[in-house]
Amino acid sequence: MKTGHTLIAIAILIASACSSGKKAYERGNYYEAVMKSVARLRQNPDHSKSIEALRSAYPLAVEYYENEAKNEIASNSNFKWKNAIQSYNNINSLYEAIRQCPGCMKAVPNPKNYYAEIGPLKEKAADESYNAGIEALMKGNRNDAKRAYFNFVDAQNYVPGFKDVVEYLEKSKFEATLRVIVEQIPVPNRYNLSGGFFQDKVEEFLHGNYTEQTFIQFYTPTEAKAVDLPYADQIVRIQFDDFSVGNSALKEKEETVTRDSVKVGEAKIDGKSVPVYNTVSAKLTTYRKELVSNGLLSMLIVDAKTNGVLTHRKFNGEYVWVNQWARFNGDERALTDEQLKICKLREQQPPNPQDLFLEFTRPIYNQLIPAIKGFYQNY
């Protein structure tokens, strides 16, 4: 029964894939209809429905984007040249897709391209993007500086080195970037190695995840000094408010364990040997040693200009190292397999304090990083 259902499901998926180009065509999405037909014809060059969909959709897709480009050029749109180029690029994408599909050339033997037409438009598109960047940059706020940066990127892409766009790329990037100094207060000398490892992990995350494209730049105080940072927008202060490493507790449990119907020997009855069963017992002492390490981390983010608090979060972390062993007196047959296993264990040497420090900071790190991400996601 399951096999029958599976075959039906596969048949439905195949039918959907076969008709996907046609459905897109019927919805009026001619670009999608062409691309889906092309994908299908790459798998099956003789697929008749896809050939039909491609033959019908392609001229309509070209006509649509040609009209879009002409309308943009005739309009007063702020980015009419950019939009026109995008429309022509869509036609070029269809052209390249069809040319790379032998089965598609049967339906559209002479696909159209607009590479020659795009060339003269790039200078105009660069100029409009450059001017839009200047206008946005003059507004003097960070969000508009971001917009300016992306406009300058467009201008540079259209015409590399257009006017003084390289200079404005640097200027807009500078004004759009939030500069944050991260102060990590060292832990006491005894734990310097582990504390340094924790701090390194935080810095590795910040430098690895906040690149130039994020418009947020994190600096350590040393890095800020090295680059002669003119100013900072925010300061993140991370420090351990309190921590304790290796608090020891030893628990001892003594009990008498028994087991019934255990063969303890044999006896002669009527000249025959028969087993003798009895209850056996043992005195079991179980030891459990715990070393508890925990700490409380504080993350304070303040405005560097006003020293106003933007957010203040605290994160707890704990790690418990456990060592168990046991000993017994009496008949070992009274013990379970698990009890026997524990009795073979011995007291272990505990980890050194630095390793314990590392362990309890792991859950703290796993809380700190999402908190940083959450705070800066809208910047």
Image (cartoon, rainbow, N blue to C red):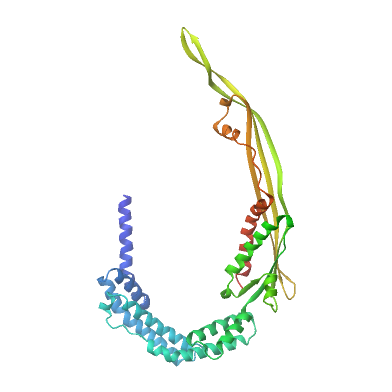
- Residue under the point 37% across and 75% down: 32
Relative image position of residue 106 (x, y in whole percent):
25, 77
The answer to which of 267 and 374 lies nearer the viewer is 267
The answer to which of 342 and 222 lies nearer the viewer is 222
Relative image position of residue 92 (x, y in whole percent):
37, 82
Could one spot residue 16 in this view of the protein? yes
- Residue under the point 60% across and 36% down: 345
Relative image position of residue 299 (x, y in whole percent):
69, 63
Q: How many marks?
A: 0
Q: In this view, does 9 lie to the left or right of 307?
A: left
Q: In this view, does 302 lie to the left or right of 16?
A: right
Residue 229 in the image: above or below residue 321: below
Q: In this view, does 274 lie to the left or right of 293?
A: left
Residue 256: quarter of image: top right
Q: Quadrant of the C terminus?
A: bottom right
Residue 303 in the image: above or below residue 244: below
Relative image position of residue 248 (x, y in whole percent):
71, 44
Q: Which residue, as the protein is rendered here, is positioned at the far top?
A: 270
Residue 209: quarter of image: bottom right
Residue 109: quarter of image: bottom left
Could one spot residue 373 in this view of the protein? no
Residue 344 in the image: above or below residue 48: above
